Image: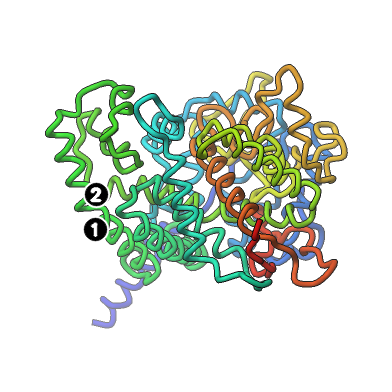
């Protein structure tokens, strides 16, 4: 019996060794310069110095460069820089058009973010072709009015006002508020209206925060606690991953009844008609739940609630985790630049005098506000990199530069935005920088949601499809804030912490900082 047991243990040990050897990370061979910290390579240093290292590579190399010693294995602190099998190469701007136009099966955005979020192991929401296609085809047109159908702007404005009414305290006198929470919750409430419609708006908004927390915990746990060849076990063994799977089921349950109603309505009308005819139908539901259902049906697919939920969760995660930060940065910048704040308030009054209500056209006339917001995301970027891809096949650029399979590639967004050869006096916040640029012959490209000038939203077919929604939602938020409230820092002469708080390739404003608010009586 003892001999048999020893034999089983020996065979198991050898098998485990062979599996470990087979699945060990294999780093692609790259002939590019490398930047890294000097001396002790602690996780804390990588978290704090990521931006400095990317800046160093940007200054020293007009050619691609490799960020960090990927063999350091720094405790998975910076997730998309910590896998030796997928080193991150930062590319100069001369490659941007080739990368942006490359087919998905060669340079993959979806695979990049799937690996970043470990969705294969956590069952989180992947970026799908449906998300890109539907948001681009339906969301932007829904923000624009037609002869017979009102746009989404008025319902979004109502959701904005309702959100501030629920999230902001009474401010008859100067009242201390931590603004990040109400800003983020109002934005998510507006996004939820666009995603699931008015009936499910509040329930989906509350669930979005629950889901984001579960997803963050599951991803962090799998990355930190499991080796690549054991991550498949997490769905069976790990409580955080199990909690995320449970949350995913809950999403399908929330959507189930409405989803069945939408399918039945489409069946009753045969779902016929062009996409333009459907958009002009005044009785059509104007939300992403409807758009995804129609998209699947047009391709002969009867979607399950889970399929729709995964697509909607992908959009919910994006809006919950990033756009609240942009709103907070903008608020701080307004406090720091009182002259610009006054100019924007005056602009709001002028535009309101020309329009009976806020529409897409009216929001487009807020050019000073648009310029201010564009300068905010130029100065403050929630990520150091963008236009991210995973190399799926050996890829050769036009100049002969080659990238092997498994390489991650990105462009140094923040360094480009702070380059004096691109932007004069780049560290200076100039509220009307983009307003002045719009006076040039090609001025149409210098607006908040443009991808021609900025890399923040990506580039090419995979640029952020929801950026126009973000643009309009932020404008509605600040129209409400600037007309309803005065605000200032709690202490006379106090300024916000500077620079922004780094966390690997990400950065954020101080989300715990308080601001004084007081209702305006004008």
- The residue depicted at 76 percent of the width and 21 percent of the height is 440
Q: Estimate the x, y position of residue 316 in percent, counting from the top left.
A: 43, 51
The mark total stands at 2
Q: Estimate the x, y position of residue 425 in percent, counting from the top left.
A: 87, 39
How many residues crowd around disc 1 within 10 Å: few (fewer than 14), some, or many (20 or more)? some
- Quarter of the image for residue 303 reads top left
Element class at badge 2: helix
- Quarter of the image for residue 412 reads top right
Q: Estimate the x, y position of residue 406 in percent, counting from the top left.
A: 53, 40
Question: Which label is found at residue 305?
Answer: 2
- The residue depicted at 64 percent of the width and 19 percent of the height is 398
For residue 516, above or below residue 36: below
How many residues crowd around disc 2 within 10 Å: few (fewer than 14), some, or many (20 or more)? many
Element class at badge 1: helix
For residue 436, above or below residue 165: above
Precedes in sequence: disc 1 or disc 2: 1
Residue ID for mark 1: 253
- The residue depicted at 19 percent of the width and 53 percent of the height is 257
Residue furthest right in the image:
425
- Measure the C-alpha gap from mark 1 to mark 2: 8 Å
Camera-side residue of 451 and 433:
433
Camera-side residue of 105 and 130:
130
């Amino acid at each position: 019996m003892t001999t048999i047991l020893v034999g089983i243990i020996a065979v198991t040990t050898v098998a485990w060794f062979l599996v470990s050897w087979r699945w060990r990370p294999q780093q692609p061979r790259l002939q590019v310069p490398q930047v890294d910290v000097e001396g002790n390579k602690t996780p804390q240093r990588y978290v704090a110095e990521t931006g400095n290292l990317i800046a160093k590579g940007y200054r020293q190399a007009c050619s691609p460069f490799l960020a960090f010693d990927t063999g350091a294995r720094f405790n998975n602190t910076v997730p998309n820089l910590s896998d030796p099998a997928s080193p991150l190469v930062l590319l100069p701007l001369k490659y941007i058009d080739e990368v942006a136009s490359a087919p998905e099966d060669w340079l993959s955005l979806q695979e990049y973010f799937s690996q970043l979020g470990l969705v294969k192991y956590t069952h989180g929401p992947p970026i799908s072709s449906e998300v890109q296609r539907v948001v681009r085809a339906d969301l932007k047109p829904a923000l624009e009015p037609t002869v017979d159908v009102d746009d989404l702007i008025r319902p979004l404005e109502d959701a904005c006002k309702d959100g501030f009414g629920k999230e902001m305290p009474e401010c008859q006198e100067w009242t201390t508020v931590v603004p990040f929470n109400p800003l983020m919750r109002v934005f998510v409430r507006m996004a939820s209206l666009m995603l699931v419609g008015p009936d499910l708006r509040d329930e989906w908004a509350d669930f979005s925060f629950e889901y984001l927390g579960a997803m963050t915990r599951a991803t962090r746990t799998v990355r930190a606690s499991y080796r690549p060849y054991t991550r498949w076990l997490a769905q069976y063994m790990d409580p955080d991953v199990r909690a995320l799977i449970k949350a995913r089921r809950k999403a399908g349950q929330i959507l189930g009844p409405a989803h069945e109603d939408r399918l039945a309505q489409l069946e009753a009308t045969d779902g016929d008609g062009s996409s333009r005819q459907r958009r002009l139908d005044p009785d059509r539901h104007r939300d992403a739940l409807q758009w995804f259902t129609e998209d699947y049906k047009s391709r002969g697919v009867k979607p399950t609630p889970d399929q729709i939920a995964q697509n909607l969760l992908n959009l919910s995660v994006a809006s919950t985790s990033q756009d609240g930060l942009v709103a907070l940065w903008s608020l701080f910048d307004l406090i720091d630049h009182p002259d610009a704040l006054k100019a924007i308030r005056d602009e709001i009054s002028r535009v309101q005098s020309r329009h009976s209500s806020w529409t897409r056209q009216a929001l487009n006339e807020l050019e000073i506000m648009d310029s201010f917001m564009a300068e905010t995301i130029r100065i403050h970027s929630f990520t150091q990199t963008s236009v991210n891809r995973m190399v799926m096949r050996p890829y050769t650029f036009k100049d002969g530069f080659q990238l092997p399979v498994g390489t991650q590639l990105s462009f140094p967004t923040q360094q480009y935005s702070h380059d004096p050869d691109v932007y004069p006096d780049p560290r200076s916040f100039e509220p009307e920088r983009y307003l002045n640029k719009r006076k040039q012959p090609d001025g149409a490209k210098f607006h908040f949601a443009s991808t021609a000038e900025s890399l923040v939203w990506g580039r090419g077919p995979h640029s952020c499809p929801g950026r126009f929604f973000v643009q309009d939602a932020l404008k509605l938020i600040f129209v409400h804030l600037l007309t309803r409230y005065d605000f200032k820092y709690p202490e006379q002469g106090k300024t916000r912490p500077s620079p922004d708080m780094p966390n690997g390739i990400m950065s954020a404003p101080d989300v715990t900082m308080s601001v004084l608010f007081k209702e305006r009586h004008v």
